[in-house]
């Protein structure tokens, strides 16, 4: 008992303490990131502590390098932890496999307190008892064994597990911050295994023990664990421990019927970043997947992390599943990109621009300034600007544009008229180019688009570009622009 008293004495008191406890499976899906974010926000909004705990007892699911993925994601998202495997703390170790010896001690303590029992049934015995397809409650006589009989069986080398002893009668009620009070019949609850025959704890048991010993006051997890909550409560009660505040979050859905999952190819946090989304936009969007601000902030959509800390309230978490809308995220990401300073955007865009533009005469800063207001995700950039490096082969059907009222015939006329104007232009910048070409349109008595659309196609070879004709010519320079205009005249003349 001295050991247990010492463990109790280590537990910090008088503060909000939350934990994010991922399994190192190499994949930080959106639901996991949301759990980490909400858990961090609860701690920070209350001036409490945020703990990172690695739950690696399910050895079959471990992936090499997965712990690094967790650290990298948390660092990039600025979800700093106060205690954890890498920074230590008063209630370590913070890696579950390093706490293995604890769980056997607490399982045996629970047996002493009448909340659990040694079960010597073999797996096939249980399977034979449950012949129907529906899951049935475990039934055996092991709970009635005397201490002497248990000791004899263990001495004889019989394999055993330790099971939770669920009351046969009555009900168990637990309270969730989102779902309220939920009551279940005890007869519906299974005598779950707490300690496996290899001495390792099951997920449900390890969570309860670790959460208590680490002083966790708020437990945030997915609503799929609602059915396990009554058994958690019974464990807390059997130990005589204070029950934490439960916050169960409804799932993040791919659509109205399907949850997001790696199997279905739904993106992880890392996938989204690789797809050109900004961390800040992803965090902002994920925060609103199942939570909404209240009061005067009810209509607000854009939050920094600091603003989320001030606005976050558990009461704003919804019971309804949230649908992950990639179109909405794309829109939000575009707004974040627009809000970046030109230098900040250039630094983020530079690797993507350099992947397709190697010509040293092209000013990448100018390219970045041109594409920033029109960029939704960074991975769109190479395809949008690759024509600056080399004119693609294109079909002259691009010169037909209904809104601009152009076709191959009048486009040829326009390019032939544009060429000498460009050749004689002494100042080569967007303003001078635009002024000269608008004057040409006025001289010919046509709309500006009759001149500008054919020039845009000639210098880009694309139907959609990040800038107008004169902006593109300014980037390409006089020599390359003239070469492309002549190329366009040649293509149209062959028709």
Image: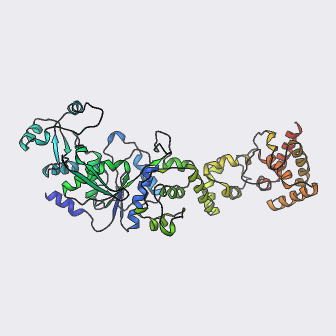
Q: Nearer the viewer, residue 236 or 181?
A: 181
Image spot of residue 444 (x, y percent)? 93, 54
| Quadrant assignment for the C terminus | top right
The image quadrant that residue 119 belongs to is: top left
Image spot of residue 376 (x, y percent)? 62, 53
Left or right: residue 268 compared with residue 137: right
Q: Nearer the viewer, residue 252 or 449?
A: 252
Above or below: residue 339 compared with residue 153: below
Q: Residue at x 67, y 58 (%)?
A: 373
Image spot of residue 329 (x, y percent)? 56, 53
The image quadrant that residue 259 belongs to is: top left
Would you say residue 356 is visible in this rendering? no
Would you say residue 470 is visible in this rendering? yes
Left or right: residue 415 compared with residue 225: right
User: Residue reaching furthest left?
Assistant: 148
Left or right: residue 314 compared with residue 280: left
Q: Residue at x 54, y 57 (%)?
A: 281
Image spot of residue 448 (x, y percent)? 85, 55
| Quadrant assignment for the N terminus | bottom left
Specify how the rendered protein is coloured: rainbow
Numbered circles on residues, count: 0
């Amino acid at each position: 008992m001295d050991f247990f008293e010492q463990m109790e004495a280590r537990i910090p008191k008088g503060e909000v303490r939350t934990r994010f406890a991922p399994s190192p499976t190499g994949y930080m899906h959106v639901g996991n990131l949301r759990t980490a974010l909400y858990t961090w926000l609860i701690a920070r909004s209350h001036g409490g502590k945020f703990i990172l705990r690695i739950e690696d007892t399910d050895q079959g699911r471990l992936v090499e390098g997965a712990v690094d993925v967790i650290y990298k994601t948390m660092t990039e998202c600025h979800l700093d932890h106060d205690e954890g495997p890498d920074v230590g703390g008063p209630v370590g170790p913070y890696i579950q496999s390093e706490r293995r010896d604890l769980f056997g001690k607490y399982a045996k303590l629970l047996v002493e307190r009448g909340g659990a029992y040694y079960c010597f049934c073999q797996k096939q015995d249980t399977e034979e008892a449950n012949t129907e397809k529906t899951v049935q409650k475990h039934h055996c006589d092991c709970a009635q064994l005397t201490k002497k009989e248990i000791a004899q069986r263990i001495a004889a080398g019989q394999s055993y597990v330790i099971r939770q002893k669920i009351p046969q009668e009555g009900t168990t009620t637990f309270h969730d911050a989102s779902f309220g009070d939920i009551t279940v019949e005890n007869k519906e609850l299974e005598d779950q295994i707490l300690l496996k025959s290899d001495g390792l704890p099951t997920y449900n048991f390890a969570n309860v023990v670790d959460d208590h010993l680490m002083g966790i006051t708020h437990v945030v997890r997915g609503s799929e664990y609602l059915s396990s909550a009554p058994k958690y409560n019974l464990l807390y009660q059997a130990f005589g421990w204070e029950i934490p505040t439960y916050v169960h979050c409804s799932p993040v859905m791919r659509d109205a019927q399907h949850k997001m999952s790696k199997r279905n190819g739904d993106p992880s946090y890392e996938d989204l970043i690789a797809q050109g989304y900004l961390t800040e936009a992803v965090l902002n969007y994920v925060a609103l997947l199942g939570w909404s601000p209240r009061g005067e902030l009810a209509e607000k959509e854009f939050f920094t992390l600091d603003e989320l800390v001030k606005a976050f309230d558990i009461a704003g978490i919804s019971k309804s599943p949230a649908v992950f809308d990639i179109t909405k995220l794309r829109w939000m990401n575009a707004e974040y990109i627009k809000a970046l300073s030109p230098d900040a955007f250039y630094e983020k865009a530079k690797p993507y621009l350099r992947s397709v533009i190697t010509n040293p005469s092209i000013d990448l800063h100018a390219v970045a300034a041109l594409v920033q207001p029109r960029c939704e995700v960074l991975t769109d950039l190479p395809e949008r600007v690759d024509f600056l490096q080399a004119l693609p082969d294109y079909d002259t059907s691009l010169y037909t544009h209904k809104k601009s009222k152009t076709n191959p015939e009048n486009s040829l006329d326009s390019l032939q008229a544009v060429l000498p104007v460009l050749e004689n232009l002494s100042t080569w910048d967007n303003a001078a180019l635009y002024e000269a070409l608008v004057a040409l349109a006025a001289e010919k008595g046509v709309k500006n688009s009759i001149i500008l659309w054919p020039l845009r196609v000639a210098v880009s070879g694309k139907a959609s570009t990040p800038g107008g004709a004169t902006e593109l010519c300014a980037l390409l320079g006089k020599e390359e622009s003239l070469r492309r205009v002549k190329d366009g005249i040649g293509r149209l003349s062959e028709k």
